[in-house]
Image: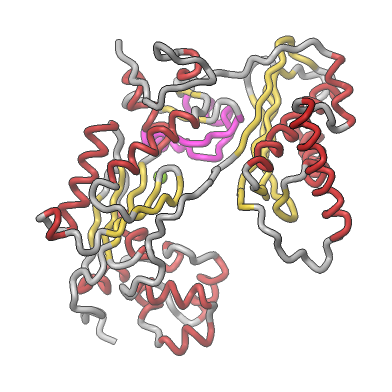
C-alpha cells in the first residue's frame, strides 16, 4: 500500500464537529472568578481527590485522580475549590445552546463534550465547515470565557480524534482526502473505543497506527474483531456509522454525598455510621433517577482538613446500599486510623448507568439480589410517606453518639446568592465575580 495515496477524494460528504471543554470545571471557576486566572486551580476539595486540574496545575504534574494532600505537597500555593456542579451544568447548558445556533443536531455526550452534525449547513451560514467551527469556538470564548478544543471531520470517531489532536483551545479539521495522513500520526491506543486488549491484539499482527488498522481488508476486520470494532473501522475510513443523536441524556458523571460533623470525632462506629448515611443518601438519589453505579469512592477528612480517599469497583452496577456495604466497610477499615480525629466523610458513586433489567451473571444470586432491590423499593416508599432515613441501616444507631449539625464545605455560588434567590430556588444564570 502506498501511504501517500488518499483513501477518499471527497472533502466533506458529512461534516461532524466534536467540541470538548478544556479542563472544564476549573475553567468555569477561572472564568467566573478572575482572581483564579493563570493560577494552579483544582476542584474536588469535598472528596479529597482531584476532579479537575487547570492547565497551570497540570503543568506541575497535578492531574485528575491525584490525592489532594499529594497535590498540596507538589504545590503549596494550589487553589483547592469544592466542586460546584450546579454552576458547571449551567455553563454546560449555555455552551450547548451556543452550538445549537449553527445546527439543531447536537448531541450532549457529557457535561463538557458534544457532537454537532453540520452537514448541509454551508449554504445557510454562507461559510465553510472550518469557518463554522472557528465561529463556534470564538462565540464560546467571548460569551462564556471558556476555551474548547474542536475537531471537524467525516464521522464521530474521526472528529473525536481531531479535537484531541491539539489541546487546549485546539482546532483541527480533516477532510476526506487527508484522512490517511492524519491517521498515520495516531497510535492505535489513541483511537476512541480501543481498549488495551484490542490494541495488544492488533499489535500481534504488526499494526501500529490507526492507518495500519484501516488499511486492513474489511473481511479480515469482520472475521477477527467485534461488530463495534468493525464500526470503528468504517468511521475511521470516513463513513459515518453513528449518527449524532439529539436524545436527551440524564447523565450524572458522579453522585456525591458529603457530611461534615461540627465537632471532629475519633469514634470508629460513629464515623462509619456517617459514611453509611452518605452511601444511603447517594443511592436514594440514584434510585430517584433510575440509575445504577458500579464505582465507589470513599474519602475521610481529618481534623486538619487533610483527606484520605480511595476508589474501587463493585462486582456489578447496583442501586442498593446493602450490595455496596461490604466493599465500603473494607475501604473504611483501610482508611480509618485509630486515634485520628475526623471531621467529614464522603461517598461518591461513579460509572453510572441507567437501571435496565439486565441478564444476571450465572454466578450471581438472583434471589438475593431481587430481595435487596425489593427492600430498597420499600425503603423509598416509607421515605415518601414519613421522610428520608426513617428506615436505615442498623449502624445509624451510632449517629446519636455525637451531636452534629450539617455544615458542608460550600461552593461560592451557595454563599453568594443573587437578589431573589434562596439556596433552593435559583435563577439560571452563572454569576461572574466582579471586584
Ligand atoms: Mg474536556
157 vs 333, nearest the viewer: 157
Image-quadrant location for residue 138: top left
The image shows residue 102 at horizontal and vertical percentages of 23, 50
Picture quarter with the N terminus: bottom left
48 vs 434, nearest the viewer: 434
Picture quarter with the C terminus: top left
| Extreme residue toward the front, this view | 385
Q: Residue at x 49, y 77 (%)?
A: 202
Image-quadrant location for residue 406: top right
Q: Number of numbered discs present?
A: 0
Q: Is residue 302 visible?
A: no
> Where are the magenta residues, as a range?
47-75
The image shows residue 174 at horizontal and vertical percentages of 23, 64
Asked if residue 191 lies left or right of residue 354, the reply is left
The image shows residue 409 at horizontal and vertical percentages of 58, 18
Q: Residue at x 79, y 24 (%)?
A: 271
Q: Residue at x 35, y 60 (%)?
A: 161
State which image quarter holds ligand 1: top left
The image shows residue 45 at horizontal and vertical percentages of 55, 26
234 vs 393, nearest the viewer: 393
Asked if residue 133 lies left or right of residue 127, the reply is right
Image-quadrant location for residue 344: top right
Q: In the rendered image of this protein, does residue 330 appear above or below residue 172?
A: above
| Extreme residue toward the left, this view | 126
Whether residue 55 is in magenta: the answer is: yes
Amino acid at each position: 500500500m502506498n501511504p501517500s495515496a488518499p483513501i477518499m477524494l471527497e472533502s466533506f460528504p458529512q461534516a461532524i464537529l466534536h467540541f470538548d471543554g478544556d479542563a472544564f470545571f476549573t475553567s468555569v471557576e477561572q472564568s467566573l472568578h478572575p482572581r483564579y486566572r493563570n493560577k494552579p486551580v483544582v476542584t474536588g476539595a469535598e472528596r479529597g481527590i482531584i476532579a479537575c486540574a487547570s492547565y497551570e496545575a497540570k503543568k506541575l504534574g497535578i492531574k485528575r485522580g491525584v490525592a489532594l494532600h499529594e497535590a498540596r505537597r507538589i504545590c503549596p500555593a494550589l487553589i483547592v475549590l469544592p466542586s460546584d456542579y450546579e454552576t458547571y451544568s449551567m455553563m454546560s447548558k449555555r455552551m450547548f445552546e451556543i452550538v445549537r445556533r449553527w445546527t439543531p443536531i447536537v448531541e450532549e455526550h457529557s457535561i463538557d463534550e458534544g457532537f454537532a452534525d453540520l452537514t448541509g449547513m454551508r449554504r445557510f451560514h454562507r461559510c465553510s465547515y472550518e469557518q463554522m467551527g472557528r465561529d463556534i469556538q470564538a462565540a464560546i470564548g467571548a460569551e462564556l470565557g471558556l476555551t474548547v478544543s474542536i475537531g471537524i471531520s467525516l464521522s464521530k470517531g474521526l472528529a473525536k480524534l481531531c479535537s484531541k489532536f491539539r489541546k487546549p483551545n485546539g482546532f483541527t479539521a480533516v477532510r476526506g482526502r487527508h484522512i490517511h495522513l492524519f491517521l498515520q500520526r495516531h497510535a492505535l491506543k489513541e483511537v476512541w473505543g480501543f481498549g488495551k486488549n484490542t490494541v495488544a491484539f492488533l499489535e500481534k499482527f504488526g499494526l501500529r497506527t490507526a492507518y495500519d488498522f484501516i488499511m486492513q481488508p474489511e473481511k479480515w476486520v469482520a472475521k477477527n474483531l467485534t461488530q463495534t470494532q468493525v464500526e470503528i473501522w468504517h468511521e475511521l475510513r470516513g463513513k459515518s456509522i453513528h449518527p449524532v443523536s439529539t436524545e436527551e441524556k440524564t447523565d450524572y458523571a458522579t453522585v456525591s454525598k458529603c457530611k461534615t460533623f461540627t465537632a471532629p470525632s475519633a469514634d470508629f462506629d460513629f464515623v462509619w455510621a456517617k459514611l453509611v448515611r452518605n452511601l444511603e443518601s447517594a443511592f436514594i438519589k440514584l434510585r430517584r433517577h433510575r440509575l445504577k453505579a458500579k464505582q465507589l469512592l470513599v474519602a475521610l477528612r481529618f481534623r486538619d482538613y487533610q483527606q484520605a480517599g480511595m476508589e474501587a469497583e463493585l462486582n456489578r452496577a447496583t442501586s442498593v446500599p446493602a450490595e455496596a456495604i461490604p466493599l465500603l466497610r473494607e475501604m473504611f477499615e483501610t482508611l480509618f486510623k485509630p486515634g485520628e480525629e475526623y471531621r467529614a466523610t464522603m461517598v461518591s458513586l461513579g460509572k453510572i448507568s441507567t437501571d435496565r433489567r439486565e441478564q444476571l451473571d450465572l454466578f450471581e444470586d438472583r434471589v438475593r439480589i431481587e430481595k435487596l432491590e425489593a427492600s430498597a423499593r420499600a425503603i423509598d416508599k416509607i421515605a415518601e410517606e414519613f421522610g428520608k432515613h426513617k428506615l436505615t441501616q442498623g449502624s445509624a444507631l451510632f449517629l446519636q453518639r455525637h451531636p452534629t449539625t450539617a455544615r458542608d464545605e460550600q461552593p461560592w455560588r451557595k454563599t453568594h446568592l443573587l437578589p431573589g434567590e434562596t439556596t433552593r430556588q435559583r435563577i439560571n444564570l452563572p454569576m461572574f465575580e466582579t471586584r
